[in-house]
Amino acid sequence: MEFVKKIIWIIFICFFCASNVYAAERIVNLTVGYKTVYFAGKARTAIAVNNQIPAPTLHFKEGDHVTINVYNHLDKDTAIHWHGMLVPWQMDGVEGISQKGIPPEGVFHYQFTLHQAGTYWYHAHAGLQEQQGLYGAFLIDPPKQPSYKYTKDYVVVLSDWSNTYPEQILANLKKEGDYYSPNFPLQPSLAKFIYDYRKASPEERQNIIDDYKMMQKMRMSIYDISDVAYDAFLLNGQSKSHPWTAPVKVGDVVRLRFIGAGGSTIFNVKIPGTSMQMVHVEGNDVKPYAVKDFKVAPGETYDVLVKIQKNSPYIIYAESIDTVGAAYGALITTPNQLVNYQQVTPFPQPLPVMRDMMALMMGGSDSSSNMQMNHSSSHEMKNQNMQHMDMHSSSDSMTSMSMDSKNSQTMGNMSHEMTDHSSSNHSDHQSMSDLMKMDPNMKMDSISMNAMPVSTSNSMEKKSQNTMEMGNGMQMNHSMSMGHGHGMDMPTEPSVIGDAISPPDSFQKTIGTKYQNLTAAVKTNDPNKPVNGVINMELFGYMDRYIWFINGEPEYKAHPIILEPNKRYRFIFTNNSMMRHPMHIHGHWFILRNGHGSYDPLLHTIDVPPGATVTADVDTDASGQWFFHCHLLYHMMTGMSRIFQYSTIIDITKGEAQPQDVVKQTPYYNRPIVRVDEVRPIDLSLVKHPMAHPAGLWLATFLDVGEDPFHNVQRLTYKGLYGPDYNKLELFTNDAEVKKGTVENADVDIFYWHLISQFWAIKGGMNYFYRPAQTPYWQPGIGIEGVMPYFIDTNIRGYTYGGSAKLDVELSRDSQMTNNFFIRVGVRGILASKSVPQAEIGSGLNQIRYIIRPYYRLMPGLNVYTEYEHEKDYGSFKNFQSSAEESAVQNTLTLGVSFLF
């Protein structure tokens, strides 16, 4: 046995050495600079590489020795990251972690040897430059051709674009997490509720009611899918007004390499009228399977094969999952071929996020996924199709199976039994018999494209649509109340605070992802290797304040996580937020533990849906320090990231160990050990204080101005919050009033404001009270503000002056009638413990104000409104007002505008 192992190793080493014979010295020059673009109808400044967006596709061979010279012609520092590449840590290209930024007019020489193959990409890792256009494909050919064959090869880079500069987008999100909500077509309004309810079945009506009840109770939108409503979506740098096209001919098998380069957009992708063969995921070949559509999250790559069977265009349709828009492209079979992009049916409208989340928390599958397949027998396939139970009734994944030529007859017999139940894509459905017409000679690992069943996001047996199989084997009827009868309320606060490495305990398989049955084409790992420690990663965020966490803390509050070399660590991700998080690890592979053992897939980015639990192992085959983060750009920038430090780099900087220079292959393809501590002199400041995105200072100003033209009354409310995430200066003037040229009400809080939870903040400081006091005065005050269940905005402040304690309580609620039309109702009461005549403070109840305010959101940060207010004075305060010849009852009708800037 030992002799056989030696022979295998000798053959492997000989193969590796032979591949290096053909290695080349490759030098590439990349110039980063500004470029004017018109992606969304207006001239805007983008960031290009060699004047191209996307950046030039870099194409190499495995074993090449690469030097990439990056010249910075920007007016700020830059850095470029090689996404998915296993390179020495100092070449990883993350500003603040692996290098200092490349200064304006400076150059950085990225040098490394390519010890892997596959589809990868590169992008800026400095500030928000990736969002402005700095991204491109990075392709590495393997030493030998893959088992699947193709005749044409195209890169498809999917990205998003806003005419608002990304720094301003981030600043806007920090003002208000739903700043861009006026531009989203899918919103939980009363009109939307009525529309959905009227067309729903009796069972689904109860589900809809439950969705909206939970939304009100948990103070979260049921359509909290995206943060930014983009102005354009790009396919290979071209918007839908000028779609990208590529030539093909009938008989071609086309390899399309999809790259998710969006700043915040997850795309649903399909090519109507055909199926695609998925063969390569995130740099690694997988056991092939057919798909009708699939999701691409930022950071992910998917390679598919498309068989050109007809002399007509093949439209590539990539729609943002928030339904804001889409990118288009086409494979055309003749020059100047007419392409009718409008014929494409959009994807079905997503169901409420909470529905998915609750299903996954109880052990279901990611029903918005479309990558689920099952490499099983035809009999098992039929049984699974009949028995699979999931929370969704209209958006589920049909399992598929692999077959060789012996199974083709069985599949043919099955084709009449299996139908596509898509609610919106019937014209795109391709039956099994249609697939049989594809080229029978195109074999891939004994799997032919014509024998592959289709995986689609909209297919399952209707008889199982109203039940789901929970993790403990218990069935839950879809009409059962989620979160009310089962104690399954969604979390509103992180349950884990602080990072830790725990001893290995019980194993938990990945549940609830689109990768559930993804299988590697070759062995990727030894599943029996001991696990050194478990790192739990709870993903969460404070949406309104736009702070994103791992384990309850943003990056700038956390310390690096220390890893030992040559160990295995188990990562367990739990997503308790409302949004998907594509989590990317630099310089390593995730071994996704989805039940295939040594064939578990290798991924550098894992898209974790709401409510899912993901288990992935990481073998520490590198050295130095590495970044790990959510690849939704604004989540990364606001805290959802971490730094991993090898213990050896700390020892080296202390002079307690010597740098290592170890590069060698492992028994697993695409998994070299690259333990190179010092390619260039180590910057001690990076190791002692690594930080990609430090805490920022944020400014938010709310200004509300209005006038009652009938009574010559002008009103102003001003609120400013200035400072970092948790500790701010608050300036607050509430309902300052000028009547007929005389100031009647005016005071200002100058408070320290401290965030204590997702929905609540405490505050305290001084208040300057100008009117209606006879003489202005200062008084100390404290308060609490936040949002109670059912979206009841609350602001309670207490003051003391002249021996009297005064309480000011304000409650209001905004009800969304349509996408941008709201009605606010509110009440404000003021009471005090004793009278202070010179301050016009009366004992007991002083005043109550009732308001009703219809308002309309014209655009993010700008509303117009009409407000009716009924104000009534009481007790001693009423007497003070009567002495000043003021009415005890006032009714005003104010027309106004409010700004958030």
Image: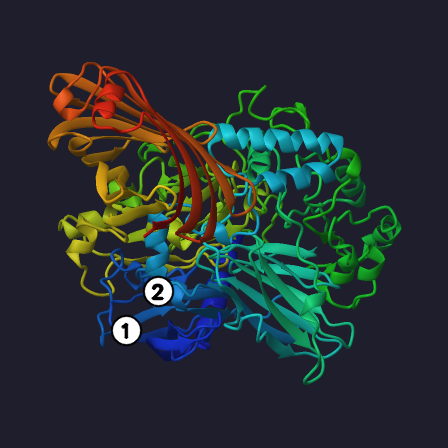
Tag 2 and tag 1, C-beta contact below 8 Å: yes
What kind of colouring is applied to the model shown?
A: rainbow
Can you give x and y, in whole percent of width and height, for residue 355 in the image? 59, 35
Q: Which mark is residue 296?
A: none
Which quadrant of the view contains residue 807?
top left
Residue at image coords 29%, 48%: 700
Q: Is residue 456 above or below residue 490?
A: below
Identify the element where label 2 is drawn.
Answer: helix
Q: Which residue is mark 1?
A: 74
Above or below for 710 versus 769? below
In-image side of 657 versus 260 (left or right): left
Q: Dot 2: few (<14), some (14–19), or many (≥20) neighbours within 10 Å?
A: many
User: Is 55 or 437 nearer to us in this picture?
Assistant: 55
x then y, percent, for residue 743: 21, 40
Density class for disc 1 (Cα within 10 Å; few <14, some 14-19, many ≥20) is: some
Secondary structure under badge 1? loop
Q: Of the residues shown, which amino acid type is indicated by label 2?
A: Gln
Figure check: 285 above or below 244: above
Q: Position of residue 792 (x, y in %)?
A: 43, 29
Residue 215 appearing in the image: yes
Q: Which comes sooner in the sequence, label 2 or label 1? A: 1
Residue drawn at x 27%, y 16% is 875
**Is residue 81 shown to the viewer in this render?**
no
Q: Nearer the viewer, residue 802 or 361?
A: 802
Label for residue 129?
A: 2
